[in-house]
Amino acid sequence: MKGQEIARLTNIWSTYQQDEQQLSRVIIESTRPLTFQLRRVNQVVAFTIYNAIPNMYCDTLAIYDGLINEITVQPEEGNRVTIYIALNHNAPCTVTRLNGLPARTFLCFSRAHLDALFAGRRIVIDPGHGGRDPGGRGPVDLLEKNVVLTMAKKLKAELAKVKAQVWLTREGDQYLTPSERLKLAKEMRAHVFISLHTNYSKDSRIGGLVVNYNPAHHAGLRLARLTCEELVRKIKRNVLEIKAAKELSGLGPIPGFKIKPVTISNWVEEGLLRNPTFYEKIAIGVLNGLQKIFLSSPE
């Protein structure tokens, strides 16, 4: 490689797609095609690039897309750069390249394990409030009943990608009683029930998320903590509370959660609800929590 022109790494990011198969992809942009070696150490993939230097800020990127956890770019002596990709599951990886300016290298990881985990899982999503019950109102007049319906539809779309069977308790602006909301989960013999809400406080300075759980389920608190942990990783909000919700005990043995990702009365967090990308982060956070729940409760 002596005398070969140095490749400058100019950008790196991750995305996931669904074509014939689901893939998580790491895309590396550079000024010329890369010479590299790929190796694995447990659930970390090390992608070492030779005769290259980073022309970008090197840091750890938090991804948490259900397969890729973090990406770390590490410059090394001798004009080498190693990119460490931490996975939460051992997954096959293929590398493809697209020449041009910039040149692009694609590390493609199969997400087939998610299909295997979620296929056949019955999930009922309950967008809270509706109709004559608007729920909380933000400082700039966002209504809880509207934003949670958007959350629910986005979550349903993400779960459909991994072959889950998903039902919503309401598809539009309808009012439902508490018993009507739980009825669908029991009729469908759901593996999990998720009620989506936003938190509210008279103090607009208070922000953060709340997760409630079904106290009738033997592992309700533990599963709620798993869900909360993954949601925090994606949306970067503080945890205000994790506690039992008596009204969810009507589910009997079905795991049930009331998830309030943000506090709508907080100026900053109402602003987040005006960003479509934020709904995607909420959906992926909940999906990641469900992944942990199903792995810990395989039945």
Image (spheres, helix red, strand yellow):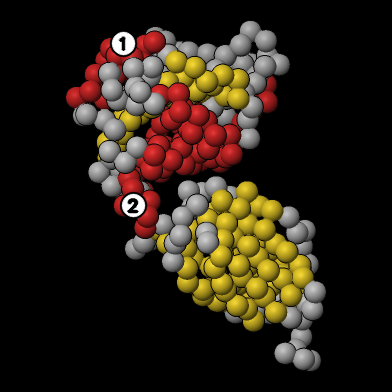
Q: Residue 278, how many percent across, how many down?
A: 56, 37
> Between 68 and 198, which is closer to the camera in this rendering?
68
Residue at the (79%, 78%) spot, across then down: 78
Q: Nearer the viewer, residue 72 or 260?
A: 72
Q: Which residue is mark 2?
A: 115
From the image, tell me which residue sits under label 1: 177
Q: On the rendered structure, is 232 left or right of 157? A: right
User: Secondary structure beneath disc 2?
Assistant: helix
Quarter of the image with the N terminus is bottom right
At horizontal 67% and vertical 75% (from top left) the residue drawn is: 49
Q: Residues within 10 Å of mark 1 (few under 14, many from 20)?
A: few
Q: Is residue 49 left or right of residue 135?
A: right
* Label 1 to label 2: alpha-carbon separation: 33 Å
Question: In the figure, residue 255 lies in which quadrant?
Answer: top left
Counting from the top left corner in percent of width and height, residue 56 is at 77, 62
Q: Is residue 187 above or below residue 108?
A: above
Residue drawn at the location 69% of the way across and 72% of the way down: 30
User: Picture coordinates of residue 179 (x, y %)?
Assistant: 28, 12
Q: Residue at x 21, y 29 (%)?
A: 188
Q: Quadrant of residue 91?
A: bottom left
Across the whole image, how many numbered discs are drawn on residues? Answer: 2
